[in-house]
Amino acid sequence: MNKKKENNAVFWVFVTPVVFAFLLVVIVPFFLGVWYSFTTWTSSARAGAGTQFVGLTNYFKSFQDVAFSFSFLITFGYTLVNMVAINFVAFGLALLVTSKIKGRNLYRVGFFLPNLIGGLILGYIWQFIFNNAIPALGHTVPGLEGLAKPENLILATNTGALMALVIVGTWQYAGYIMMIYIAAIESVPMELHEAAQIDGAGAWSRMMKITVPMAAQAFTVTMFLTLVQSFKQFDVNVSLTAGGPSTMFVGKPILGTELIALNIYNTAFVSNNLAQGQARAVIFFVVLALVALIQVYLNKKKELEL
Amino acid sequence: MKKFLAILVALAVATTGFAQAKLTLMQGKPEIDAAFKAYAAVWSKANNATLTIKTLGGTSNAMGPQLKADFAAGSMPDIFTIEGPEAYAEWAAVIADLSDQPWVKNTSVAFKSGGKVYGAPVAVEGWGMAYNADMLKTAGIDPKTLTNYAAYKAAFAKLDGMKAKLGVNSVVSMAAAIDMGWVVAHHNFNSYLSNGLAYDDKSVAKDLVAGKVNAKRLAEYADWVELLFQYADKAVLTTGNYDAQVNAFATGKAVFLHQGNWTDPNMKAANATFKMAFAPHGSMSTATDGIFVAAPSYYAVNKDSKNAALAKKFLNDMITTTEGQKFMVQDAGMIPAYSNVKLSPTGQLSASVQSWAASGKIYAWNQGLTTGDFRDKSLAPIYNQFANGAINKAKFIELFTTAVANYGK
C-alpha cells in the first residue's frame, strides 16, 4: 500500500462517523421537512387521515395569514435592534475587560455566565423581574412610584414587551460575543498602537482607526452569530412573553410579540397543522439564508489583510 | 470503586431488565405528579412491571407536541390522557375500545363515541367564582344571592368600596395574559357556551362552530367579562401568571378567584385557612344557579401497544383497589368520577364542587367542542386586548362575532 492510499483510508475512517451523523440529523430531516411542506402530513393518528401531496397550498395559506406576515415584520425589527444592542454592549464589555481594570478575569467570567443559563429559565427569571421586582421597587423607593403602576409594566405593552426581549437577549448573548471581541482586540499588534501613540493619536482615534478595522474579521463572525441568534429567538420568547400582549394588525387581533420561530411552533402544535408549520419553516430558512449571505458579503468587503 | 459500580450497573440492569413489562403513562396534571409516581411505584412492584409516569402540564395543550413526537418516533405511550372530542379525533386510530372494562358500569361520564367507551374519566372537576366566605360575611353579602349579573355588579361595587377594610388589592383575581389564555378563552368563554342551559344542550356551541353567534347572549356575556376585568387587579390581569393569580386569592388579597377546584393544592401550600366555596357565574341577566362541572379529561389506552392488556389492568386497578382509590382521592385530591369510590377529597373547593354536583345544579363544559386553534389563536388575543384596555366592549363584541364568523377558515 502506498502512502497516498493509506492517507485516504485514514481520511475516510475519521470522516465517516461525522458524515453519517450529519446526514442523519441534518440532511435527511431537512429534505424530509421540505417534502412534508408540500403535503397534508400530520404526526397524529386521525382516523382515515393519510398524507397527500397538495402542492403549494401550505405556502399560499401561510402568506394569507396576517399573523405570519406580522411575525416576519417584528422579527426583522427585533433582529435589527437586538444586533445593534448585543454588539455595542459586547464590544464595550470587551474593551473594558481588555483594559487594565482590576479583577478583569472575574468580569470576563461574570459577563459570560448568563450564556450558560437555559433560555427558558432565563425568560421566567426575567418575567419575575419585570412583573414583580421592578413594581416592588416602585412600592418601596420614594420617587419611583411610577414603576408600581400596572399601566407601566414593561410586559403589558407591545413595544415594552419587545424591548424586554431585546434586554434579555442582550443580557444572555453579549457575554458570548464579548469573548470573540476579546480575542480580536488582543490579537491587534501592540506596535500599531505604539506607533500611533508616538504620532499623537488619542485613545478614541486609536480605537476607531486601529482596533475596529483590525477586528473586522471578528465583526463578520459576531454579526453573523447575532443575526442568526436573533432571527431564531424562541425559548426566551416562549417563557417571557408567550407572544403577548395582543395587538391589531390589518383589522385582526393577533399576538403582538410572536417572533417567527414561535409563530411556526404555534402553527404546528397549537393549530395542529404540522405541514403548514413546516412550509413556514422552509420560507423562514430561505429568508434567513439570503439575509445572512448578504450580511457576510457586506462584512467581508470591510475585512483587511495585514 | 470499580467493583461497586459494576454491581450498581448489574443491579440496574436486573431491575429494569428482561422479565418485566414496561408501561408508560402520559398525563397533563403537574399537581398530581408526585402522588401519581408514588402510586405507580407501588403498583409496579405488585404487578412485576415498570410503570413510568410522564407529566407534561402547565399551559394548555402542552402534551400535544410531545405525543406527536413520540408517535412519530414509534414510542407512543401505552396510556395517555385526552380532553374531549377534538383530542379524540386526533388520535382515534390508536385508541382502544374500553367498552368491556369492568369499571364502565360505575361511571356515567366515560368518554364515548359512536356508543363505545374510549376513555376512563380522570376526575370530576369544576369551576365557578371561588369566594372567600369570611370576607363576604364581613361585607354582609350572602353568596346564595350571587346568581346573575345584577347581583354580582352590586356585590363587586360594595366590596370595592371596602377594599381597605378587607385588606384586599382587588375584588376579583382574574388573568388574561396570553399564556393565561386558557382562563379566559377556554373557561370563561364556556359561560357563553353553556351557562343557564340544560346539561346536554349544545345548541350555542353548535351554532358557534357553524359561524353564528347569539347576539343577546353575547351582549350579556360581554357585560360579565367587562365586570370581571373592571374589578380585577390590573397587574395580575394583564401580566400575571397562574401563581400570581391563585396566590392573590390564597393570601387574602382578593375576594373572588376565577379558577377551579384544581387550585386546592395551591390553597394548601399557601396555608389558606379561610372558608371558601364556589358561586355561579353571573354571565346572564337571568339567574343561573349552578357551576360548571364535568369530567374533562380521560385516560385512553394505546391499542397498538404490546402491553395494552396490562394497561387496561392498571386503569381497572386504580379505580377498584383501595390503594388506587386512596391515590386518586386522598393523595391527589381529585373528586372521583366513579360511583364505587366512597372516599372524598379534603380540599374545600373540591368539596364545594361535590355539593353542587350532588344537588344537580351543574352546567356543562362545552368549550371542548371548539378547536384549540380557535380558542388560543382567535379568541385569546381578543380577551387580552379587552383586558389591556386597547378595545372597548362594543369592539370586543364586534371582534368576537367576526372571529366566530371565520370559525375554521
Image (tube, coloured by chain):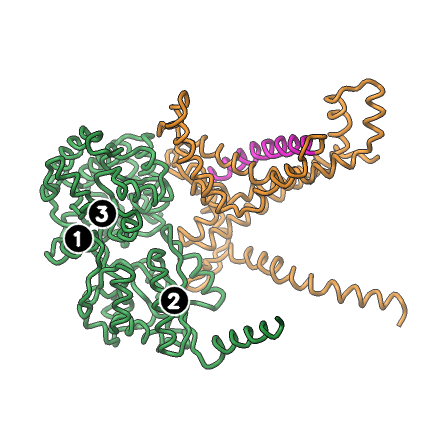
Chain colours: A orange, B green
Dot 2 alpha-carbon crowd within 10 angstroms: few under 14, some 14 to 19, many 20 or more: many
For disc 2, the marked residue is B25
Viewport quadrant of the N terminus of chain B:
bottom right
Foreground: disc 1 or disc 2: 1
**Callout 2–callout 3 Cβ contact below 8 Å:** no
Task: Tell me if residue B19 is in the magenta stretch.
Answer: no
Cα–Cα gap, marks 2 and 3: 35 Å
Query: Is residue A185 left or right of B149 when viewed as pictured?
Result: right
Cα–Cα gap, marks 1 and 3: 15 Å
Q: Please, what secondary structure does the residue beneath circle 1 have?
A: helix
Name the amino acid type tagged 1: Ser
Dot 3 alpha-carbon crowd within 10 angstroms: few under 14, some 14 to 19, many 20 or more: few
Say whether disc 2 or disc 3 marks the residue closer to the N-terminus: 2
For disc 2, the chain is B
Name the amino acid type tagged 3: Thr
What are the residue bounds of the magenta stretch?
A69-97
For disc 1, the chain is B
For disc 3, the marked residue is B273
Task: Tell me if residue A80 is in the magenta stretch.
Answer: yes
Q: Residue furthest right?
A: A2
- Residue B294, position as x, y percentages in the image: 22, 57
- Residue B226, position as x, y percentages in the image: 23, 34
**Image height of B406 relative to B165, above or below:** below
Query: Is residue B96 left or right of A55 when viewed as pictured?
Result: left
Q: Which mark is residue A4?
A: none
Foreground: disc 1 or disc 3: 3
Cα–Cα gap, marks 1 and 2: 30 Å
Q: Residue at x 48, y 75 (%)?
A: B16
